[in-house]
Amino acid sequence: MKKGNEFECYTKYTQTILAIDHTDQLKKMLNNEQVKQYLESKSDQMKETYRYLLPALLHTPIHHFQQYLIYLEKLALFPESESAQLTDILSVLRQNSYHIKRSKLYMNLSIHSFSMPKLNDNKINNWKNLIENWDIKESTPLIDSYLKHIVIQNSSSNLITNVDRRAILFSTILCLCKALSNDKWKFKEKIWLRKFNINDQIIIPDHEHVFEIQCDEKNYILAARSEQDKFQWLCLLIILQRELYNILVNEDAQQVLLTPDPSRYKFCAPNLPTNILIDYHTNDKSSSSSSFIIRGATMEKLIEHLTHHQLLHPRFVKSFLMTYKSYCTPLELLNLLIERYNIPEPASAYLYTEQQLKKFRKEYVQPVKLRVLNVIRQWVDKYFSDLIESNDHVLDHLQTFLQSIPDTGGLYQFKTSILKLIDKQTIDYQDSSKKNQQQDLISDERDQIEDLDVFHYDLKELSDQITLICSTYFRAITSQELLYRLPNLYNLQNYMKFLDKVLGFWCKRSILETSNFEERIAVTERFIQIAIRAYEKKNFAAVFAIIFGGIIDLEKSLPHTWDRLSKQSRTFVTLVDDMLGEDSHFKLYFEKLRQSPLPVVPFIANNQTRIAQMKEKHNMIVLPTGEILINFRKFQQIGEHLCEIQQYQNMPYDIIPNYDIQRELKRLNPMKGFQDENSFQNYLVTRKEYIEPADSSPRVFPIRRPPHTWRSYSRVSRLFMIPSTSFNAHSRTSSQCDEHHHQKSNTDISTLLYLGRHTSLDNNVLKSSDTFAFDNSLCGTNDDFQPIINTQELKPPPIPPRAPRTS
C-alpha cells in the first residue's frame, strides 16, 4: 500500500470531511425541501438521523486511518529486522495525517460498534448514597452527564425558569436529579424512552442548544451546555430509538436466503411426497418448525434434517446415530456427510449482490458445516467402534477429510477437537487391559463352582454385592448391543447370564438340593430376604431373577414348603408376581420404576422384546409410485426405548465393593457338570419329586448344614422389610394368601422337623411409605409349632445346686 501510494485516498477524504465548509454544505443539503420530503417518507426520524448521526459515521474512515498509525508506532518500538521498513511506512503515514485534528473526530459512534456498559452493583450503591429517593433498579447505564432542565410552567405563558439538573441516561430511561448541598442530589423525575421523538428545531428566547424529547405523556425541553454536547446527546438518543437497527433487520429479512442448485447439491431438493413424509402435530403446517415428525424419508432427506441450517433436534441426532446401521453402512453415512459439508456456491453468483452472498455464507454454509462436524463428533464419541471395526477403512477416510479442512475460521477448533478425540478413542480401544476386562466378566470353566452356601455371608452384604454386580454389568451395556446383539461385546451377555443362569438357577438348585424340610424353609426364606434387600436398593433385575427363577413356582412344585413360608414372604412374592404380570402389560412395574429415584437397575427384558419386535418388520415404506422410503418413525421409537434404558445407566450405586464375595458370585455356575440346560432342568424335576412327592407328605431327611448357621437370629431373622403400602393396590391380597394357606394347613406334618421362629424386633424400624416396616405378628412365635427334635439326642445335665455359703 505504501509503494502504490494507496494511502493518498485517506488524504483526499480527510481534507473533504474536515473542511470548514463541509458541515455547512451538509446542512444546506439536508435543508433542501426535496431531501427533507424524501427522508421523512422513509422514516419519522430519518432526517434527524442524517443530521446528527451521519457526520459521526463519516469520521469512521479517518479514525480507521489513525488506528493504522497508532499500531505501527507501537510495532516500530520492537527491535525487529523489519523495523526499518516500518519506519519508512510511518513517515508516509505521518505526511498524510499532519492535517488531521483528532479533537474533531467523533470516535466509536458507529451503529455496529455501539454498546452500552453494564450496570454494576458498585455504581448503583454509589448513586444510592449520592441521590435521595433513588428507585432505579433494572436499567443499563449509558452515560453520566449534566444538562440544564428547562421547565415550561404554563403552555400559554412565556415564563421560563432555568434549573440545573443532573441527567443519567440509560437504555430506556433518562433520569433527572436536582442539585442539593455538599454534592448531594435528589431524584426528581424519570423519562421513559420506549417511544419518543426528537425535535431539534425548537427555539426559545435567550436559550441555545435546546432540544425537545416528545413522549406520549409529556414533552421535555432540555438544553445542553454547548453545541458539541447537544450533538453528542442527539446522537445517543437517535441510536436508542433503534430505528436504524429496525430498518436493517427488515431489509435483511426481505432478502431471500440463497440456496445451492438442487442439480448440483442434492440436499437442497424440495420436500415432496416421494422423498419425505411428515406428520404434523397441528393442522397448521406453517406453525412451529419443531411440531412435526418425520415418518419416512430418503437417506438424503434424513441427512438434510440431521444437519439443517435452522432446525436443531438433539433427540433426532441421537436416535439417528443409534439406529443408522439398520438402513446404511458407516461408509455410506460418512460419504453423505462429506457431500453435505462441501456446499457449492449458488449458480450464477455474479448475478447476486454481495449482501446476498454474505447472508448465504453466514446463515446457510457456516451452520451446515458446524452441524456436520457436530454429528461427526458425536459419532466418534459414542460409536467409535463403528468406525474402527469397519472393513471399509472408515476411520482413515474420516481423518483424511478432517485434515483437508482449512486451519482458518471458526471450524479449526472443531476440527482439532475431533482429531484429538479420535486419538484418545484409538488409545482406549487398543488398550489391552480394557479389552481383557470385558472378557474377564465371563468366568473360566476350570475356575467355576457349582454351589455357594447362601448362609456363608452376611445377608445385607451378599445382597448389596449382587446389586453392585448387576449395576456394573448393566451400566456397561451399549445401545449397539441391545439393538444388534453384537457377538464381540460381552456386557449384555454377562448381564443376562448373571441374572438367568446364576441368580435364578442358584436359587432353584439351592432350594431343591436342601432335602431337610426345616432347612429348606430357611434357605427359601434366605433367598426371599436377599430379594427384599435388592428391592429396597431398586435392583428390580435381581428381584425378578430370584423370585421368578426359583421362588414363584414353589406354590405348585413344593406346596408344603410354600405353606410354611411366613405370611410376609408370600405377600412379597405375590407383589413381585403382580408387578410383572403380563395381563397388566407391566403397568405396576413401570409405575414403580418411574417413582424410584436413581440409582436403579431396571428389568430390560421387556425393552429387548419390544426392540426386537419393532426391528423385525416394516423397515421401509413402499409408496404407490414405487419409491422406497426409510421408516424413520419406527427407528425413532426404537431410539426412544434405548434412551429410556440409558437414563438409568448414568448413576452408580454408592456401595463399597467386597471383591471376595464378588469373585465367588462370578465363579458360580449352577449348571456345572451338566451337558446342557435341558439335562439341568430334568435334574431339578427329579429332585422335586424326590423331596416332596406329589400327593404325599414331604419325606424326612437329615440336616445338611450345622444348625447354628441357619437357626440363629442373625441368619433366619423374620425382619422382612416390606413396604407397608405396597399390598393394597394388587389383585392378590394377603387375605387371599391366608385363606389359601389355611386350606393347606391340615397336612399331616407331625413327623417333620420344623424351623423355630424368632420374635425379636429391630429397634430401628422405619415408618415411612418408601422404607420398610416390620410386623412381628406376621412371623409367628416359637409356640406356633411344636418342633420335634431328635429324641435320641441327650439332654444337658441339670444345673447343680448352689453350695451353701461358708462363714
Image: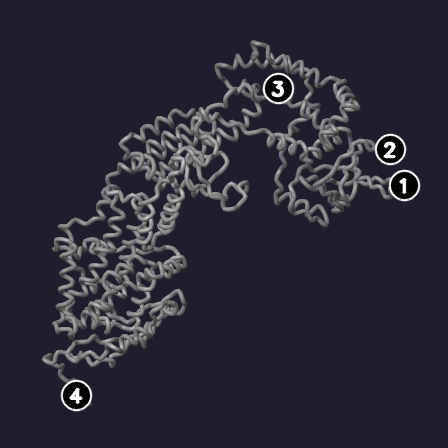
Q: Which x, y percent locates residue 17? A: 70, 18
Using the rendered view, name the quadrant where residue 350 is placed: top right
Would you name the residue on which mark 2 appears?
Answer: 206
Using the rendered view, name the quadrant where residue 397 is placed: top left
Which residue lies most toward the front here? Answer: 624
Is there CB contact under 8 Å for labels 2 and 3? Answer: no
Marks 1, 4: nearer the viewer: 1
Establish if 29 lies above or below 609: above
Would you name the residue on which mark 3 appears?
Answer: 65
* Quarter of the figure with the C terminus: bottom left
Which comes sooner in the sequence, label 1 or label 4? 1
Would you name the residue on which mark 4 appears?
Answer: 801
- Amino acid marked by disc 1: Ser
Q: Which x, y percent locates residue 144? A: 69, 38
Establish if 722 lies above or below 114: below
Q: Which x, y percent locates residue 464? A: 29, 59
